Image (spheres, rainbow, N blue to C red):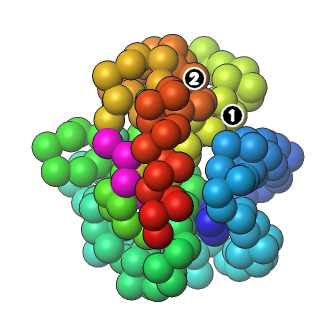
Amino acid sequence: MQPIPWSSSEFEHNTSSRNSIVYSLIQHLSKIFGDMARINSSSLQSSFFQTPAATMPPAHLYDRRRKQWISDQILDWLLQNKNPDLNTKVLAICNFDAYSGELNFVFGEAHLGGRVAAIYLPRLRQQFYVKKSDTNKLFEQRVVKEAVHELGHAFGLTHCEKSKCVMHFSNSLQDTDYKYHRFCERCNKILKRQVTDK
Ligand SMILES: [Zn+2]
Ligand SMILES: [Zn+2]
């Protein structure tokens, strides 16, 4: 797993909030996927030292009219650009908004059973919708849940009907806040099987 942060200037300058999110993400991903996969955070360190321009996807993947990035094209670009080997999943942590197909926005997206996944942070913050901002803790938990969810897709899992399972589809912050950051028993079994079959 190679998390790739892309930062807007606001996020880039707020190093303590950025570091705490990334740190909690690495910890949680290690706990959840640790016995199946190795978390490689060294690429994370190196991308922190790059200029934001160097880590941003190309401008034609941005829809100017909608002011959103085009998520499925971001995934294709990631696959080409990062070209992970067959046993590697790349998770891009994107501090920008994105949509995909018919969905007017996505919290994240992944190639099902593929090598790339992305999560999009702005709509995971309460201040995207209302003036009042929420606690960093709550935001961090949402980031973890969406990251685990998209990596679950990358490991071949589809949506789960159990509303507490991390693989349940989130259409709102309420959905995300309601679910756990873990896989239900059934999803966990499928996940283990997917990993050991490879
Ligand atoms: Zn999903
Ligand atoms: Zn489940």
| Residue 123 placement, left or right of 46 | left
Q: Indicate whether residue 8 is drawn in magenta.
A: no
Compared to residue 8, the image places residue 187 above or below, namely: above
Residue identified by numbered label 1: 140
Residue 125: image quadrant is top right
Asked which secondary structure carries label 1, the reply is helix
Which of the 4 image quarters holds residue 55? bottom right
The answer to which of 86 and 20 lies nearer the viewer is 86
- The residue under the point 32% across, 22% down is 161
What span is in magenta? 154-158
> Can residue 145 be spotted in the picture?
yes
Amino acid under disc 1: Glu
Task: Write down the residue under mark 2.
Answer: 180
Instruction: Evaluate whether residue 127 shows in this view.
Output: no
Residue 76: image location, x then y, percent: 32, 73
Task: State which quarter of the image contains the N terminus.
Answer: bottom right
Query: Which residue type carries mark 2?
Result: Tyr
In the picture, measured across the screen, residue 137 lies left or right of residue 172, that is right
